[in-house]
Amino acid sequence: MKQAAQACVAAFQFLSRLPLPIQIHYSKEVFARSVVFYPLVGAVLGGLVWGFGYGSSLLFPFVLAAVLTLVWTVSLTGALHIDGLMDTADGVLSHRPREQMLEIMKDSRVGAMGVIVCVLAMLLKAVIFYTLLDQKWSWEIVLPFIWSRWFMVIGMAAFPYARKESGLGSYFKGVSARHVTGATLMAVVVSVLIWIGTAMWGGIGTIIASDGLSIVWIGMGALLLGMIIARSMANKLGGLTGDTYGALNECLEILLLLICTIIV
């Protein structure tokens, strides 16, 4: 129980900027166990985004509410995944040899491709938020935050680590099939609980109208799209790194939110 609690705290402290002032001893074992709770972190972050978006839409026009929701979304993670997306874009889109790509990704400076990809990603996410606020700001919006983080665990377990030397991503080398199983169970459980909870809150009519198939579509989308993106990056880099894990999450989050605009 103590190990599970430490792993849960580690997941929240690593993936978010939520105030959780609990001191734990970080090790590769703690990092590996923490991935089981990544979908739970996604559910909490997604719930906070949903609540903020709903509240801001009551006070401001949808365009302004969408931009404020985007700012809130970025602040919740401290731009952790966006940083990985920018570094990955600089390296992968440089069209250099593999070793040079990895060196570029290590550079703390941001290149032109990183800035371009970041701007486009933020614009796309803002427009998606506006579209969802204008159409239907429903419970399905939480799902992309859950399943994008779930696929990061798949990426850690299914693809080799690209760097020869140690990096932040090397702490996840111990992630195995049992961690993937735990993360999958966590993702399914929290998704179903959110569906049932929101359906019951809306009454019997909402329960009948909402069949929960959104969970299936988002989960399948995360797996298929995630494998395409991860395999593409792994083919160029010889595996994945800590930066590509963040890029995976950011790309999937946007793509799954796009699927949400179709679902709602």
Image (cartoon, rainbow, N blue to C red):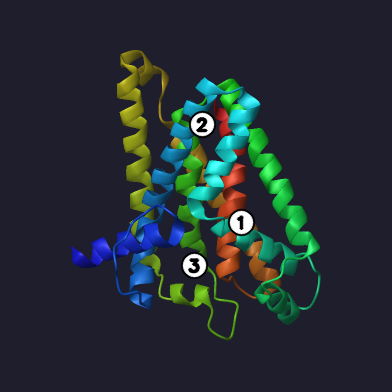
Q: Residue 264 appears at what percent x and percent y?
A: 54, 25
Tell me, yes or no, whether the two marked residues, 2 and 1, touch with CB atoms within 8 Å: no
Q: Is residue 43 above or below residue 87?
A: above
- Give amino acid for label 1: Ile
Rendering quarter of residue 115:
bottom right
**Residue that label 1 marks:** 82
Tag 2 residue: 53
- For this orientation, the residue located farthest to the top is 205
Image x and y of residue 31, in percent: 38, 70
Q: Earlier in the sequence, mark 3 or mark 2?
A: 2
Helix, strand, or loop for circle 2? Answer: helix
Nearer the N terminus, badge 3 or badge 1?
A: 1
Mark 3: secondary structure: helix
The reply to whether callout 3 and callout 2 are in contact (CB within 8 Å) is no
- Quadrant of res 25: bottom left
Residue 87: x percent and y percent? 67, 66
Q: Amino acid at mark 2?
A: Gly
Separation (CA) of disc 3 from disc 1: 18 Å
Of label 2 and label 1, which has the lower sequence position? 2
- Seen at 64% across and 59% down, the residue is 85
- Spatial CA span between label 3 and label 2: 31 Å
Q: Nearer the viewer, residue 64 or 223?
A: 64
Decide if residue 218 is in sight here: yes
